[in-house]
Image: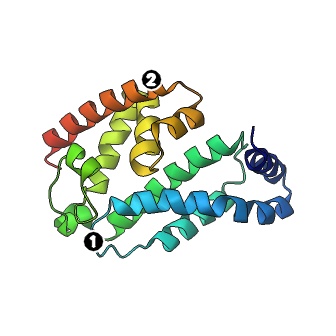
């Protein structure tokens, strides 16, 4: 285990145990990871999105700080929860702006198009969130893979590390989840 990962895990445990100074030491160690996650999320959003990467990091971190009941296991657990919180922030933001009612100015694209498209393409984050919640009911592990890969921007290897699985399992889950989500999004007209 590398030293920084060990430091992060130790600080997460101390923070879970109520050591506020651990949080102060943790912030500089995880800020880069949170920015990377937020950047991956924001690349999937429409051009001119009113929420910027820094604001997404800040909002997610505020929610993390408020999650005092979480018993952090390790860096991977932290990244998984962070990715989920960032997704929630974006969904909450989209709902607050009335995307469902007005379409948010987003151009309709398929899930696969959004995976390979540049920043000028956006996907209806509310429709994807609904579809991902449906997938989580049927295949929770596949939903976690999508959350980490699509929203979190993690590679296959990083996702395998976070979920403590083989890269082959992640690739299979990713392929199956993409097919299921694409079918759901097409059926929903998202």
Label 1's element? loop
Nearer to us of marks 2 and 1 is 2
Q: Which residue is mark 2?
A: 168
Q: Which residue is mark 1?
A: 47
On screen, residue 17 versus residue 28, left or right, reads: right
Residue 41 position in % (x across, y down): 41, 58
On screen, residue 166 versus residue 51, left or right, reads: right
Question: Looking at the image, which residue is at 18% across and 69% down?
Answer: 105
Residue 137 position in % (x across, y down): 40, 30
Question: Looking at the image, which residue is at 82% across and 47% down?
Answer: 10
Label 2's element? helix
Question: Is residue 63 in view from this perspective?
Answer: no
Q: Residues within 10 Å of mark 1 (few under 14, many from 20)?
A: few
- Quadrant of the image containing the N terminus: top right
Residue 79 position in % (x across, y down): 59, 48
In-front residue for pair 190/6: 6
């Amino acid at each position: 285990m590398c030293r920084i990962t060990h430091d992060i895990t130790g600080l997460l445990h101390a923070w879970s145990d109520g050591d506020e100074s651990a949080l102060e030491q943790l912030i500089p160690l995880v800020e880069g990871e949170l920015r990377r996650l937020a950047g991956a999320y924001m690349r999937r959003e429409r051009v001119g999105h009113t929420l910027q990467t820094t604001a997404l990091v800040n909002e997610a971190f505020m929610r993390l700080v408020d999650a005092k009941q979480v018993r952090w296991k390790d860096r991977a657990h932290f990244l998984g929860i962070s990715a989920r919180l960032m997704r929630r922030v974006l969904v909450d933001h989209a709902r607050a702006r009335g995307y469902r009612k007005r379409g948010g100015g987003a151009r309709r694209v398929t899930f696969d198009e959004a995976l390979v498209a540049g920043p000028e393409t956006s996907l209806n984050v509310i429709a994807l969130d609904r579809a991902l919640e449906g997938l989580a009911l049927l295949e929770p592990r596949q939903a976690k893979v999508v959350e980490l890969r699509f929203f979190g921007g993690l590679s296959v290897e990083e996702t395998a590390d976070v979920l403590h699985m083989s890269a082959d399992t992640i690739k299979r889950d990713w392929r199956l989840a993409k097919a299921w989500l694409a079918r759901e999004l097409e059926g929903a007209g998202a």
